Image: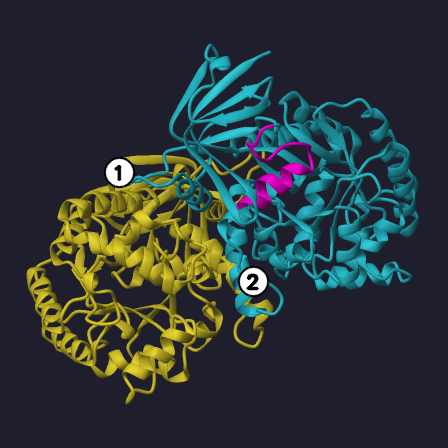
Chain colours: A cyan, B yellow
Amino acid sequence: MAVQIHHGDILYAENKNSLKTHENSYIVVVDGMVEGIYTEIPAQFADAPVTEHGRGVIIPAFSDLHVHASQYTERGLGMDWLLYDWLNDYTFPQEAKFSDLDYAKDTYDAFVDELIANGTFHAAIFATIHRPATNYLFERMEEKGLYGYVGKVNMDMGAPDFLCETTEESLAETEKYLAEHTECTTVKPIITPRFAPTCSQELITGLGKLAQKYKVGLHTHIVESKWEAAEALKLFPDHGSDAEIYERAGLMDNGPVVLAHVIFPTEEDIRIMKKHNAVAVHCPDATTNVIAGIMPLATLQDKGVDVCVGSDVGGGHHLAVYKQVARAVQLSKIKEFYEPQESRTINFANAFYCATKVGGSAFGKMGSLEPGYHFNAIVVDNVEDKGILLTPAERVERFCYIGDDRNIVARYIDGKAL
Amino acid sequence: MAVQIHHGDILYAENKNSLKTHENSYIVVVDGMVEGIYTEIPAQFADAPVTEHGRGVIIPAFSDLHVHASQYTERGLGMDWLLYDWLNDYTFPQEAKFSDLDYAKDTYDAFVDELIANGTFHAAIFATIHRPATNYLFERMEEKGLYGYVGKVNMDMGAPDFLCETTEESLAETEKYLAEHTECTTVKPIITPRFAPTCSQELITGLGKLAQKYKVGLHTHIVESKWEAAEALKLFPDHGSDAEIYERAGLMDNGPVVLAHVIFPTEEDIRIMKKHNAVAVHCPDATTNVIAGIMPLATLQDKGVDVCVGSDVGGGHHLAVYKQVARAVQLSKIKEFYEPQESRTINFANAFYCATKVGGSAFGKMGSLEPGYHFNAIVVDNVEDKGILLTPAERVERFCYIGDDRNIVARYIDGKAL
């Protein structure tokens, strides 16, 4: 039994209404899992090594539930364009380069390093249509000990020829990909149709069969813009909602069901999401940069839908999920200003809860520091001004608003220091 | 005659429609001023020292036209509150501490260092009501060679007792402050009534007389929220617009006229701003964090109003003006989505132009690298991914979206390296 103890201020979100703080406390970690938090070291752990974090705040690692690893090198470029042009002129040509495995390796190495630098240890990731490059990303994530769902993207229509598969290729490559990863540890495959406008009915139906056969989850975008929502129903005319396209194909039966954006959900979308314990992924910067609209976050929560947070790089420009925590609060204020009947302002605790405990739940017992959770954690420090002491909650709020990777002074996954 | 030459990629905004790029070029600086940009070093400057910046992009320093130095230690705290509570429970108690000069020194030293770190070399600054602390900030700015307008704040009503002056005190202290700085170099005093809801008519009238006597400009907030706009006209009932309150008092006669936020301008506000060459200061993060509404930036420009950019720390959470460049593009997209009849999306060049050339114009020939401008510049580097070369414009866009002070690898004011 390997025991380690960390001393400092400890903070996590128990629920959307409150941050739980243990000041000047000891967190005991046994075999990589949180055993408990104490004001004094319990007698049975008296011999365990103690790591002192001083004014550092120990918080759960972040979860990024929607990110395109292949768009990493696009971040912060073409940000004044709109979705259609940005996809066609920037993103699709960029993704096409991942047919070259060497190109992919450089990008995916940098992507994984940057996830770690920013304290994101759990991520649901879009790769590209290319299986070899996707496998490289999968293995790189495992090698570093990160938790993830990595998807080979499917698209057999509605995209440039250089980035389109035939339906048969798409299904065959996906099955190979799933078959290659039936024995996996921290990273798992996930079925990743880009979105309805780039997938034929035949492809979606075929992916549903693979989901049943290999017992894997779904990661896609739904109702991300008024255009996308309308286009989806035009292409799938016998369906009543965007979510139903995936539900009817059997893509929501195994979990996790990770649905990005969810900006214009219908009541039917909401019913389906709840039925399948889907997480709705809020990506504030991306919806501001290239997509029109703001998720009705508080309203979705009120209706029983779990909401988590994604960076959506490269629609979003930065991989740091903590920056999206701040942005989620900001966008909720704008939403309330313009559409008070649709949603309302959320507080910081709620946004932090979405980015840690809710997001982490897609991967197992992660995203909190309560007993029984994986000790996947970071230590945030050096955010105070000279002579002015802040509470742990203030230090974490400030970190999310103005901090960067320099403020993350220690990183642990399953208790192992990175 | 002191000549220096810098080699690299050079970029500045000529106007709101275009970024001017000189790749692989030489910028010649004579006695701290830009002499010209060349593809080869002109013969008459052949002996001057050349500084090589490699892949660095040489760009103009940023101008922050609206920032509260006294709120520096508040940044990123209480950001889920709303304006009224945030002012009364966080900001006013914090500002009251500036009666203690030692406290003020620590904060103002850190504030000035952070301006420099982030490449902001020109700033219009609210201090507090306290003259000694304001003088310290003034001198600290001058000592570091920064350009600025520093204001002792006026408020004789509508604020807690511990932060209110009597009308007589407010006028007397302001006159002392102006009289102390009649001989100044890079920093100048500016009259800074907080906003109409905290100033009596008698105070505004008296400040107008001081503006005439000492020939100084105005820095205040106008139409920053629907509440503020309505309250201003309730307190100044014989006035037709928020801007008119200051115009009629004679506060707009000498320039500069720096008006923060301008979210709900009437046609009369716009007429007055144009008449007095006022700059309207867009503070994207602040208007998202604590204020309701988004400036109609493109529409103000269409109507002939100059728009620049401010961090508005502590309503805004970060001093980096380049981050506000990105945010200005983002908010213009949200504004167009919700109010297409009121304004429209701006491009990156326009936002960069506002934050450099327009903002800089309030201080003299600053904010561009055209001949005749002060060589107040920074060098931005290390934003490219391995093996992927970006254009200078892409490097600067990326810097504004995902960069931080680590990407600013050199800083010059009047040609002097900091």
Question: Mark on residue B66?
Answer: none
- Residue A344 is tagged as 2
Query: Which of the 4 image quarters holds residue B1?
Result: top left
| Percent of width and height locating residue A1 | 60, 11
**Is A22 in front, or is B302?**
A22
**Mark nearer the viewer, 1 or 2:** 2
The reply to whether residue B309 is visible in this rendering is no
* Discs 1 and 2 share one subunit: yes
Residue B105 in the image: state x and y as whole percent: 18, 45
Amino acid, disc 1: Lys
Which of these two is toward me, A402 or A298? A298
Residue occupied by mark 1 = A386
What is the secondary structure assignment of the residue under circle 2? loop
- Alpha carbons under labels 1 and 2: distance apart: 36 Å
- Indicate the amino acid at tag 2: Arg
Q: Earlier in the sequence, mark 1 or mark 2?
A: 2
Q: Between residues B5 and B138, which one lies in front from this camera angle? A: B138
Farthest-out residue, front: A43
Whether residue A361 is in magenta: the answer is: yes
Whether residue A106 appears in magenta in the rendering, the answer is: no
Q: Quadrant of the C terminus of chain B?
A: top left
Residue A275, x across and y down, in percent = 79, 50
Secondary structure under the numbered disc 1 in the rendered image: loop
Question: What stretch of residues is rendered in magenta?
Answer: A352-371
Q: Which residue is drawn at the image coordinates 19% and 43% (left, top)?
A: B2
Chain identity of mark 1? A
Residue at mark 2: chain: A
Answer few, some or many: residues within 10 Å of disc 2's Cα (few below 14, many 20 plus, some between 14 and 19): many
Q: Residues within 10 Å of mark 1 (few under 14, many from 20)?
A: few
